[in-house]
Image (cartoon, helix red, strand yellow):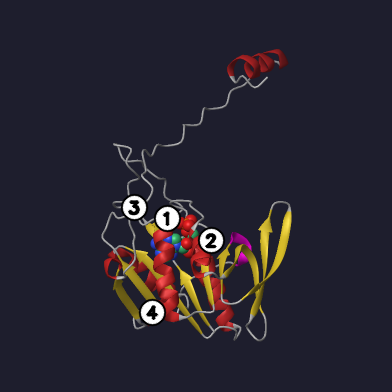
Amino acid sequence: MRILVGVKRVIDYAVSIRVKPDFSGVVKDNVKMSMNPFDEIALEAGVKLKEAGVATEIVSVSIGPEKSVDILRTALAKGSDRAIHIQHDENVEVEPLAVAKLLKKVVEKEQPQMVLLGKQAIDDDACQTPQILSSLLKWQQATFASKIDVSEDKSTAEVTREVDGGLETLKIKLPAVVSCDLRLNEPRFANLKAIMAAKKKPLEVLKMGEMGVDTENRIKVLKVTEPQKRQGGGKVADVNELYDKLKNEAKLL
Ligand code: AMP
């Protein structure tokens, strides 16, 4: 059973985002980039299935500029067996629809029984790629997984999903697309030995422009702005002043 894992290189979750002065996007130069946190969880889920003897091979795939090679090496150090890098030029934004089409191409070639993706990329917060991919492939999907159990004959999987007010367990036919949520697992750290060993693992590089996929953007970003600065708190003398502020300043009453 082969598992394909989609890993995206994004601005590290701990970095405070700065907007470009012309509001055309966010500053990415000299900013720490990392693997999308939900993709680390997806990768860990794949590696755990391999360790449990369910999966036999984990292939990580990333669509991104040349520098994305660093997160693919991290994926290899964390247990991926192979990596595929679909390269595009720096400063190109690839929309979820195009990402899904490119992943479909890889799926057709690699024939995995499961595609594990993060529930969303923390840069665009689109939360679209898994759903579009399953629809393009006409495969079943389970989104926001917090538990994945593959049946013994590997023809189905039971996936527990986090839904409003509880957990829902679905039975899906394999092959399928599963998107991974926060509580699925705690991703491991790669030790030095694994990082060194990862340098020798296979990493295939493909050019996005040569994949025969229409990757033209459909959406135009008009403006990116920072969230409004939070106002500091203040003390009120009594209930009357509180009422007055809620009514006349905050206009909540
Ligand atoms: P999104 O739909 O952009 O929120 O992304 C959802 C998931 O799709 C991510 O967590 C990744 O697993 C996968 N994905 C999105 N963009 C890429 C990319 N450029 N390369 C590889 N996987 C991606």
Sequence-earlier tag: 1 or 4: 1
Q: Is residue 87 above or below residue 251?
A: below
The magenta span reads 181-185
Please determine whether, in this image, residue 211 is positioned above or below residue 215.
below
In the image: residue 194, left or right of residue 186 = left
Secondary structure at badge 3 equals loop
Whether tag 2 and tag 3 are in contact, CB under 8 A, the answer is no
Query: What residue would you read off at disc 1?
Result: 12
Q: Kindly indicate whether the residue at mark 1 contacts the one at mark 2 (C-beta within 8 angstroms).
A: no
**182 in the magenta segment:** yes
Residue 25 screen position, x and y as percent: 34, 44
Residue drawn at (35%, 82%) of the image: 202
The quadrant of the rendered image in which ligand 1 is seen is bottom left
User: Which residue was labeled with disc 4?
Assistant: 198
Label 2 – label 4 distance at C-alpha: 31 Å
100 and 189: which is toward the camera: 100
Q: Which residue is mark 3?
A: 31
Q: Give SS at disc 1.
A: loop
Residue 116 visible within the image: yes
Q: Is residue 65 magenta?
A: no
Task: Give the main secondary structure, helix, strand or loop, of the magenta stretch.
Answer: helix
Which picture quadrant has residue 182? Answer: bottom right
* Mark 2 to mark 1 CA distance (whole Å): 24 Å
Q: Disc 2 and disc 3: Cα gap in Å?
A: 30 Å
**Amino acid found under the numbered disc labelled 2:** Gln
Image marks 1 and 3: residues in contact by CB distance under 8 Å: yes
Q: Earlier in the sequence, mark 2 or mark 1?
A: 1
The disc label shown at residue 131, or none: 2
- Does dot 4 land on a helix, a strand or a loop? helix
Indicate the amino acid at tag 4. Answer: Ala
Relative to 224, is 173 on the left or the right? right
Label 2 or label 4, whichever lies nearer to me, is 2
